Structures are given as structure tokens and as C-alpha cells.
Image (cartoon, rainbow, N blue to C red):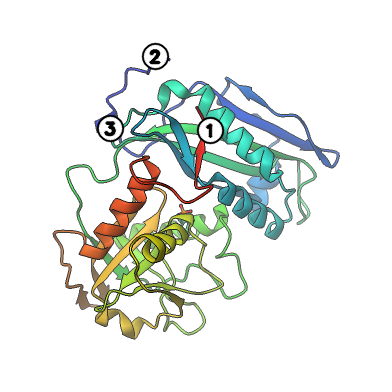
Amino acid sequence: MEKKNIDWANLGFGYQETDKRFVANYKDGAWDEGALVSDATIAINECAGVFQYAQTCFEGLKAYTTQDGRIVTFRPDLNAQRMEDSCKRLEMPVFPKERFVQAVIDTVAANEAYVPPYGSGATLYIRPYMFGSSPVIGVKPADDYQFRIFTTPVGPYFKGGVKPLTIKVSDFDRAAPHGTGHIKAGLNYAMSLHAIITAHNEGYDENMYLDAATRTNVEETGGANFLFVTKDNKVVTPKSDSILPSITRRSLMVVAKEYLGLEVEERVVPFEEIKDFAECGLCGTAAVISPVGKVVDHGKEIVFPSGMNEMGPITKKLYDTLTGIQMGRIEAPEGWIQVIK
Ligand SMILES: *Cc1c(COP(=O)(O)O)cnc(C)c1O
């Protein structure tokens, strides 16, 4: 398969249309067979549920080329499960998990020419999503839905080296207790845009959200979970019902315990404790881990000992081990690598 003529190393994180996308429609209480299609444009009614009441959820994962030349993706079964959880919370029909994984495989295979080569640092980002497609004007779930998957090549996250982030403790809340923070819904992102633009305008890279009820415990950022490392090398991640369960973070906790022999804790993390940690990172599919150098709480700066120039040593080990597993340089736990071809 001839690859597209793309400058992989200089790709950004933006949308670029690829050849094929998967589309399935839900009508009269059942999903159709679905198909790979060429048209990137969607035509739906002006009153579709997604436009009026934001009935939509999504997933994000990546395909890449391993050291031995296979095209693979990472734990797509967990994306399928998480999308099921999101759909149930939004009164949307579930797209069956086995079909979800197969559709991911088929969509990537159909866009093989866009899967970046090993070593380029670039990946093929995969975006499954679902939305209410039939007209809704009284507030209720739509009758019809569309499930789609498109792919787009994205560049290396750490272009020109790793640069630790500066994070602001936000005055806005991301998720309410008993709300929708634990699902991957577009609505969680719409309301976070003002907070992130505000943070960027003030010179920060990201927001740290605290729990909305007491504003005392660390939750997450707009799109990544926190990992902390204590001074005695324990890996700690916040536990809360309003955090989105990151697949990267859950995988890193396994790597910390099983590959690096570190103690791991998922527990409530009081903001007061942040100043005592040695390292901090943000976990998500896009970067795997981005190191955090500094947290600013209304003018009060907390600088982690790892500093503003490099990843902390444990963060680096976690990063190297998980990316090694993903790229086929280190043996993966059973079931983590889904081979596409
Ligand atoms: C997607 C997402 C993450 C990261 O999840 P991964 O499965 O690791 O990509 C973290 N927080 C939020 C709010 C998210 O939407």
C-alpha cells in the first residue's frame, strides 16, 4: 500500500479528510449493517436532536505502525465499553461492542495510506461518535441515530521536545456531582470552551478543575486525567465519580504496578496535598502523558521538583514504557494491542 505524500513529522493536531468513513443508522429500533462511504458531509434535518439538545457523545483513539510494520490500535474494547456507558446516560441506543471494534478495524484498514510510518511520531487519530439525527422539538430523546467513525492523521504531540505545562486552578466547574462528567459527551466540552479560552488568554496551558461540591479535591483538566508521583515514588491518581475514566490513565496505573513495580493509589486527592508531590502529569490519548511543571492557584505558584524543563523521572519511565508497549518494542499485556493488519 502506497502511503500518502504527507510531511508526517510536521503534521499538527487538526482535521484532514481521509478517504473513507464508517456510517451506521439506527431506525425503527435497530441498527442497519453500516458501510464505509466516501462522502465526508452529513445531511440531516434542521431540527435533529443533536442540534437542539446536544444529544451526542464521542470516543478518541489512535492507530499507528509498530516497529515490526504492523498497523495496530490500543485497547479499542475499552472505547467501545465507554461509549456504551455514554450512550446509556444520554438515552441513546448502544452500538454493539464487537461491531464497534470491527468498525474501527475496517475504517483504519480503508485509510491505511494515511497511517503514519513507524518512528515518525505521527499517528492516525480515530474519532467514533454518535448523535440524534431525527427531529426533536419537545425535550426528549431522538428516535433515530447515526454512528460514524472518521480518521485523520495527526502529528507528534511533543514537537521540538517536551515542555512541561503551566496549569491554572479554574474558577469554573467542569462537572457536577451526579452529573455527566464521567461520560464522553460533547456537552461537557461545549461548556469548557469559555474556561479554556479564559485560561489561554491569561497565559496558562490548561485548567485544573476541583470537585464542584466542595472545591477542595482535584478532579481533572478539560480533556485529561491527572497522575501524581509522591516523593517516595508512589503513583497517585484522583478518584471521583465525575472524572472521565481515561484509558491512558488506567493503562499507566497497570504499567506503574506491573512493569515498574511501583505502588499505585486511586483515591481522593485534596488540593492541599499537591504541593507535596514530586511530579505531575496529564494523561490522555493525544499525548499519553504531558508533564506539568507548575500549578497556579490565584497567584500562588506550586512548582514541582521536576521543574519547567523536563519530565520527572517516574513520569518519563511511565511514558517510555507505555509508548514502548504501544509501538511493539515492549511486550504488551494480553488483549491490549488490536492488530489491524
Ligand atoms: C477523553 C478524555 C480523557 C482522556 O481519556 P483517554 O481515554 O485516555 O484518551 C480525559 N478526560 C476527559 C474529560 C476526556 O474527555
> Image quadrant of residue 301?
bottom left
Q: Secondary structure at mark 1?
A: strand
Q: Nearer the viewer, residue 238 or 187?
A: 238
Q: What residue did someone put label 2 on?
A: 2
**Callout 2: few (<14), some (14-19), or many (20+) C-alpha neighbours within 10 Å?**
few
**Residue 235 vertical position relative to residue 290 in the rendered view, above or below:** below
Residue found 35% across the figure and 67% down from its top: 261
Tell me where residue 124 appears, x and y as whole percent. 42, 34
Residue found 15% across the figure and 63% down from its top: 308
Q: Nearer the viewer, residue 301 or 137?
A: 301
In this view of the protein, can residue 200 be seen by the observer?
A: no
- What mark, if any, has residue 273 been given in the picture? none
Q: Secondary structure at mark 2?
A: loop
Q: What residue did someone put label 1 on?
A: 150
Check disc 1 and give the amino acid type. Phe
Q: What residue did someone put label 3 on?
A: 120
Q: Quadrant of the N terminus?
A: top left
> Image quadrant of residue 164?
bottom left
How many badges with numbers are in the image? Answer: 3
